[in-house]
Structure formats: structure tokens, C-alpha cells
Image (tube, rainbow, N blue to C red):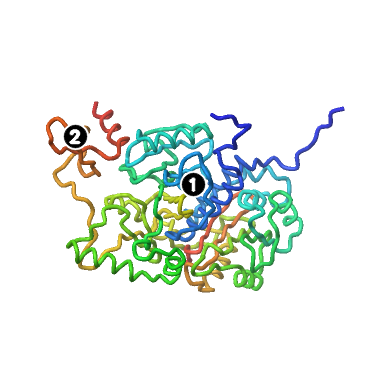
């Protein structure tokens, strides 16, 4: 752990933590609404998970067990660096087992094993504003949310549908939170959208560059936006399985085997895959 | 000659503040659930340790508070957090250190900040001290944080205040978030979307 004389516990000063904590509580009270906050400087560039890190640093305590994943992987550069930073300035225990963790910080995935009510998932968000694709001005999108004026969003989905024959959004698929706010679920795949609905766990979303925090409390109604005659569809992994652990019915990464040129699949959630293999061994 | 100085309080703003915040986060994420902050609140030696612990967790000089008819609590909160006291209609955090009658409570709920449609987070959070959280009054609530419907037995004051807030029909996303605290260190959150059901 770094010198406690020079750095506060969890790196951020207490004033910063308090502001972030106040924003988190408001975000929990208004599911899907983006609460503005004063995003702080960190020893990591904005756009590399600073929103998620600020939330994690503001909520974490000495008793917590932390897991950090990036695109499902415990070992990618972003996840390893964030883990190192938090461990250095808090001394908390780290894990790759999502069932052991009390806080999981993630970029682009929700773990395969359903999370419990005593856990918190912190998601890093690059572009929190779902309406940005239809309106570039922040002042206008803020007013659109105020008036629940989402016709532009619906039109965007319809145009996508008429152009491609299906809604082609692969990640950041917009959802409606508690029937009121259109929300960007962060760049998780469509497969993970359903995990947000009526979940047992609390989801906190942090966008450091865009200075926004939002939340989905447990058991909140989260609906992926779609049309009555065009139901929401997730990625289809029918007939495919992980080449390492054999898991089917999970989110898989497609990989080209360099030697054979064959297309193979592996679990995107490496902690889940590793645990399955250990149990099977 | 060394003089043993007695600390005015033992509350650690870093670690106790973090623990109180997590309990508060759990309470507001899971409305109707009772969390306990007795250990942290016990580090204040005054008549309102629970409100002090909650205040010292969230307040600083960027926020405005309103403390109803309790200059001692107001003074102590200001001394420890530098939070300024403002009028009821501009306060971010409202502290009610005793149980209010129906008329007073109605006036408070009507006059606190409800937020705006563009900035619903600019609304008040009210901390209410009551004799107990658990009680004989059955309260049926629904909303985010609750699986289907929750029946919880609460102290009658909690149900009365919640019913009174609901009766104002403040249109979501505007609203008031309530946090009840009792003398045993129990806290219970009733955020704006957590509403009573018949």
C-alpha cells in the first residue's frame, strides 16, 4: 500500500468522495437519470475508466473484496492497472472470482454468474448520453430527458430497422429505466441487457470524461427499446460452445485459430471459464 | 506537564464515513430494509448521534442544510462539516430531530426542494429521527429496489410521513427522498419512487 502520509485512503480526498457519494445516492433515487458530478483528475487518462474508478474509490472500504474486469477478462491491461491502483491506495483484497467479490468494476461486460444483492457492479461508461446519436448539444438532450421527449430515439431505431432489416446496434443498446428515462447501459453486448432488468444487485455507472453518474437499483424495470412487432433480440450462440470449458448458453468471443484458420469460441468471462475448468479438473 | 486532551468525538470521517455511506446506500437501494449505524453513530456523544453520523458522512461547505428547531444540532453539524444552514426551501439536506405533527410535516414536505424536470437531483433529502423504525404498523410498499411488493412492520410515524409525502402527488422525477433513523442506530430509506400501496 502506498504511503498513507501522502495519499488519503482510496486516493481521492474526502471532499471529492463526499460529492461523488451524494451523486450516487441521487442516482439511486432516480434510476437511469444522469447525475452531473465534478469528475476528478486521476493518475490515469480520462476515457480509461475514470468514472468507474471514482465510484469504486468512493464506495470502497477496508473490508471489501474487489474484482476488476475488462471485456470479461481479469487480465487485460485496463483491468490490471485499475486493480493495482485501487489495491495500492486501499490495501483491499483482490479476486478473480465474481462470487467472492463485494465490488466488481467492469468495462463492457456483466459477469456470467448472477450477482447477489450484497454485491455492487460498477460499470465504466465512455458515452453516457444515449440521445447523443440524435442530438449533439448537451443542453438540448438534457431538456429532452426533462420532457421525456424520446421520439428522436425511436426514429433512429426505426431508421436502423428499415436500412438493415433489423436493429443493428451491437452494444450500448438503449434501454428504458423504470418507464421514464432512456439510458445507455454502457457498451455491454445486447446479451447482457437482460441482466439489468429486475436484478438482485445494484449497478452504478460512472462516466469520468462526461462527468456523469447514474444507477440501476436492484429490482428496477429495465426494458430494451424495441417495437411491438420487432422484439428485442440478443446475440445468437446457438450450437456454439467454449473450446476451453465447453460452456454453452453464455456470451462467447469469436476467435480465428491462426494455425488452422478455423473459427473457434471462448467464454468472454474469463473468471467464469477458469472456475468451470478448475471444477471440471 | 502533559495534558490529556479529550476528543470531542471519535467518529473517523474517512473510515466511519465510508461505512455509514455504504449502509445508507444499501438502505436507499433497498427501500424498507433496516440497516444499522449504531457503531459509527456511537462515536458522537450528544443527543442526536445518528443524525450527526449521517450529516458528517454527506455534508460539507458545498451543501446547504436546514435543521428544524434544533440550534444545538445545527451548530454541531456546522462545526464539524462547515455546512451552512439555509432556509427550508433552499436546503439540500433537512434534519428533523423530533417527530413532527401532521400540519408541520405537511408544510415541510410542501416547501422543501423537489428538484426540476431538467435537474431532479436538486431536491431535498430529509433525515427524520423517530423513536423506532420497527413497529406495529404494517406498511406495503412498491418501487425500484423492491422485489414485487414488500410488507414491512414499521413505527406508525414512518407510515404517516410516507403517506403524507405520497399524498402530495409530486410528479416523478421530481420528489423527496426520506431517511428515517431511530435511537438504536437503525436507518431506513424511502426514496421518491418507493410508494405506499393499499
| Coordinates of residue A203 in the picture (x, y in percent) | 42, 50
Q: Chain for mark 2?
A: A
User: Does residue A63 appear left or right of residue A229 in this picture?
Assistant: right
Q: Chain for mark 1?
A: A
Can you say which quadrant of the picture contains the C terminus of chain A? Answer: top left
Residue extending farthest to the right is B1
Residue at image mark 1: A55
SS class of the residue under badge 2? loop
SS class of the residue under badge 1? helix
Tell me the residue at 50%/64% (across/down): B192
Q: Residues within 10 Å of mark 1 (few under 14, many from 20)?
A: many
Q: Residue A244 carries which label?
A: none
Q: Quadrant of residue A177?
A: bottom left
Tell me the residue at 39%/55% (across/down): A219
Question: Is residue B198 in view?
Answer: no
**Frontmost residue, A59 versus B106:** A59
Q: How crowded is mark 2: few (under 14 residues within 10 Å), some or many (20 or more)?
A: few
User: Does residue B71 appear left or right of residue B92 in this picture?
Assistant: right
**Frontmost residue, A250 versus A87:** A87
Counting labels gives 2
**Frontmost residue, B135 versus B23:** B23
Q: In which quarter of the image is residue B144?
A: bottom left
| Coordinates of residue B177 in the picture (x, y in percent) | 54, 62
Marks 2 & 1 on one chain = yes
Q: In which quarter of the image is residue B181?
A: bottom right
Tell me the residue at 27%/50% (across/down): A191
Residue at image mark 2: A243
Mark toward the start of the polypeptide (2 vs 1): 1
Amino acid at each position: 500500500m502506498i504511503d498513507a502520509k501522502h495519499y488519503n485512503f482510496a486516493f481521492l480526498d474526502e471532499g471529492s468522495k463526499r460529492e461523488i457519494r451524494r451523486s450516487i445516492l441521487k442516482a439511486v433515487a432516480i434510476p437511469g437519470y444522469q447525475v452531473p458530478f465534478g469528475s476528478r483528475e486521476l493518475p490515469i487518462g480520462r476515457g480509461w475508466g475514470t468514472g468507474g474508478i471514482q465510484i469504486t474509490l468512493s464506495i470502497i472500504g477496508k473490508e471489501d473484496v474487489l474484482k476488476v474486469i475488462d471485456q470479461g477478462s481479469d487480465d487485460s491491461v485496463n483491468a490490471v492497472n485499475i486493480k493495482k491502483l485501487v489495491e495500492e491506495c486501499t490495501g483491499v483484497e483482490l479476486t478473480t472470482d465474481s462470487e467472492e467479490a463485494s465490488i466488481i468494476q467492469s468495462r463492457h461486460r456483466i459477469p456470467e454468474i448472477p450477482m447477489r444483492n450484497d454485491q455492487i457492479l460498477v460499470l465504466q461508461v465512455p458515452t453516457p448520453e444515449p440521445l447523443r446519436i440524435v442530438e449533439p448539444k448537451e443542453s438540448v438532450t438534457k431538456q429532452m430527458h426533462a420532457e421525456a421527449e424520446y421520439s428522436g430515439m425511436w426514429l433512429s431505431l426505426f431508421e436502423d430497422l428499415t436500412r438493415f432489416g433489423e436493429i443493428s446496434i451491437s452494444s450500448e443498446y438503449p434501454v428504458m429505466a423504470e418507464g421514464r428515462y432512456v439510458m445507455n447501459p454502457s457498451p455491454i453486448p445486447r446479451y447482457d441487457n437482460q441482466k439489468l432488468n429486475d436484478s438482485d444487485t445494484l449497478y452504478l455507472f460512472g462516466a469520468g470524461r462526461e462527468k456523469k453518474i447514474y444507477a440501476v437499483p436492484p429490482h428496477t424495470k429495465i426494458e430494451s427499446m424495441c417495437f411491438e412487432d420487432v422484439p428485442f433480440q440478443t446475440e445468437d450462440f446457438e450450437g456454439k460452445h467454449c473450446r476451453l470449458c465447453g460452456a454453452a448458453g453464455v456470451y462467447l468471443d469469436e476467435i480465428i485459430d491462426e494455425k488452422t484458420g478455423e473459427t473457434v469460441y471462448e467464454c468472454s468471462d474469463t473468471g467464469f471459464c477458469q472456475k468451470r475448468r478448475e471444477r471440471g479438473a | 506537564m502533559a495534558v490529556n486532551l479529550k476528543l470531542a468525538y471519535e467518529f473517523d470521517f474517512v473510515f466511519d464515513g465510508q461505512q455509514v455511506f455504504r449502509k445508507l446506500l444499501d438502505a436507499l437501494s433497498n427501500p424498507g430494509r433496516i440497516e444499522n449505524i449504531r457503531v459509527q453513530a456511537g462515536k458522537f456523544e450528544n443527543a442526536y448521534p445518528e443524525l450527526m453520523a449521517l450529516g458528517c458522512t454527506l455534508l460539507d461547505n458545498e451543501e446547504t442544510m436546514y435543521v428544524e428547531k434544533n440550534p444545538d444540532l445545527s451548530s454541531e453539524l456546522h462545526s464539524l462539516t462547515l455546512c451552512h444552514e439555509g432556509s427550508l426551501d433552499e436546503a439540500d439536506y433537512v434534519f428533523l430531530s423530533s417527530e413532527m405533527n401532521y400540519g408541520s410535516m405537511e408544510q415541510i414536505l410542501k416547501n422543501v426542494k423537489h428538484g426540476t424536470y431538467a435537474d431532479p437531483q436538486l431536491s431535498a433529502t430529509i433525515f427524520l429521527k423517530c423513536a423506532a423504525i420497527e413497529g406495529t404498523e404494517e406498511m406495503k410498499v412498491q418501487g425500484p429496489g423492491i422485489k414485487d411488493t414488500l410488507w414491512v412492520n414499521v413505527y406508525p410515524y414512518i407510515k404517516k410521513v410516507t403517506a403524507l409525502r405520497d399524498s402530495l402527488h409530486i410528479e416523478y422525477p421530481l420528489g423527496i427522498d426520506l431517511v428515517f433513523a431511530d435511537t438504536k442506530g437503525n436507518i431506513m430509506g424511502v426514496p421518491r419512487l418507493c410508494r405506499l400501496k393499499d
